[in-house]
Amino acid sequence: MRNFGYFEEDYSPSLSEKGLWRRIITYLRPFRFPFAGAILLSLFVTTCALGLPWLMQQAIDLYITNPELHFDQRMEGLSTYVLFYGGLICIGFTTSFLQVLLLEWIGQSIMHTLRQDLFSHLLTVRLKFFSKQPVGRLVTRLTNDVQNMHEMLTSILVTIFNDLLRMACILGLLVYMNFRLGLILCLFVPLAAAVTILFSKLARNHFRAIRKQLSKVNSFVQETVSGVMLVQLFGRTNDLRQEFATLNNSYLRKTLRQIRLFGTFMPITELMSSVAIALILWYGGGQFIQKQLTLGELVAFLSYMRLFFQPLRELSQKYSIVQSALASAERIFDLLDTDSEEDRTPDINKKEALSLTGDLCFDTVTFSYLPGQPVLHDISFTVKQGETVAIVGSTGSGKSTLINLMLRFYEPDSGSISLAGHSLADVTKNELRNEIGVVMQEMLILQDTLLNNIILDTGKERKEVTELLQQTQLSQFVENLPQGLDTIIGEGGQAMSTGEKQLLAIARVLCRNPSLLVLDEASSAIDSKTEKLLEQPLEHCFKGKTVLIIAHRLSTVQRADRIIVLDKGRIIEQGSHHELTEQNGPYSRLVALDFEPDTF
């Protein structure tokens, strides 16, 4: 079965459990005072819960079983304790309600910050990272994994503190009330601790497997839905249904393993509780018969025993949530620790910005996406300021890789690239990309107005954009839209043809007014008629600018001052269109193939 781009079979966590908690605490630190308030409220909740059995004991011993008092006195005293009991319940409810509100606010705020940090980091991660990561896996990090941590932060951390505090207080109270009966309970503490530790180790491994399999399912669904047209076109529906069933069944099996583990832990806890209560009834009942223990003390003991084992029973479920959250936290922080592209940008203290208007120079550049498999070999060429240079070659020859290196999406293995005499390694990425305008075959369209899609981050005014469109003959394109520049485009908006998208890409580039223009297969997906419509806007783009054309269709490169031919990552020819066609070399053969009429 395919792995769907999900490379986690050999995944090993980079952080220890202590390291994970340390990272989680850094997100809790800004909310330390509200969190301390939640813990303070937990003291009130615990006090109220532990006070109820004591009130029962007092009511039974002082009034219910006390024959020395008259009926009216006993009922009056009993009524007083009932009022105390009800008041304690109300206080416990109020403090618990306030605690839940406070924890939900803390949890939602932390998840908001964490989700924002994850998304912001993804925008700066080096391009190489995305070539190995399916979109579904990254979506899982931002949604399911973050939600798992939310459940832990809102409903678990303080309640576990409540439970541990309650169990410790109950143990102390029982030993204080009756030392021998308290010792019976103490015998179960080491056994309960051993069972819990064993469960925690097994649960963590199961939850890691569940998180990994869920990411595989999400990746497969994203891959399938995004290409559903091709799936239906090539009749892959049944095959993909079977592959999804395999992934889904694997997820079910892993989840059922975790449920079986949880189902084993619960009966063991119930068994310990039942045995402990039976021993208390046997021994405590004997003491009551011998008048060494009051009925109220015995009832209080049994109530405290139930309160002691109740959080222990719930601890398995809560610990499951904690282990699931930690498994998610491992992957969230692993993603946050991925190197961003800014990590490789030098920190240069400059008094003024560098001038990047000048020659573009590649000097013996070698590059490989995978170690030992170079796709570019000792590439050297110079594009003079104001010159138009075209780079052609067959698919896989390394044309687009040159653009990736020039924009610093990747760094060369060896050699150097310079612009206007400045090594690109010494130029910040923002400065570099502001000076280079790229018109690509594929482009991102925001679900917004056409005007905002053109302006992006340039801060141009509407009037400036209108004048620019008129100068480049793009105004007719805008006039044909229902609301002109205010037309909503993108997903759910006005549909755009391939040619219109290219016109938008050109308008974006002109709005930035770069000194170096790059056309990366910009006309390969459009027909000849649309290509002619683009000629005037492109000619305006070329004026006074250094232009680098990456093209598969050779009809678009004949206007270039110089043409560089690539083959298997090496420069094999360069010269003008006229010079290269006369040499009857690789370029002339490419031209012959390009202009050869289609045969059927």
Image (cartoon, grey):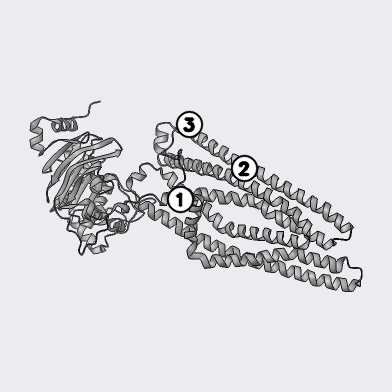
In this rendered view, identify the residue nearer to me: 76 or 248: 76
Measuring from the top left, give residue 353's x and y in whole percent.
20, 61
Residue 434 at x, y = what percent?
A: 24, 56
Q: Is residue 325 visible?
A: yes
What residue would you read off at disc 2? 259
Disc 3: which residue: 238
Choose between 388 and 107: the one closer to the eye.
107
The nearer-to-camera label among 3 and 2 is 2
Upstream in sequence: badge 3 or badge 2: 3
- Total of numbered circles in the picture? 3
The local crowd at label 3, few if under 14, some if 14 to 19, many if 20 or more residues have their Cα within 10 Å, is few
Type of the residue with mark 2 = Ile
Q: Amino acid at mark 1?
A: Ile
Kindly report the distance in space between the C-alpha atoms of the residues bearing marks 3 and 2.
31 Å
Is 226 displayed left or right of 158 in the figure? Answer: left
Q: Which mark is residue 499?
A: none
First of labels 1, 2 by sequence position: 2
Contact check, label 1 and label 2, Cβ < 8 Å? no
Mark 1 highlights which residue? 332
Q: Residue at x 43, y 47 (%)?
A: 138
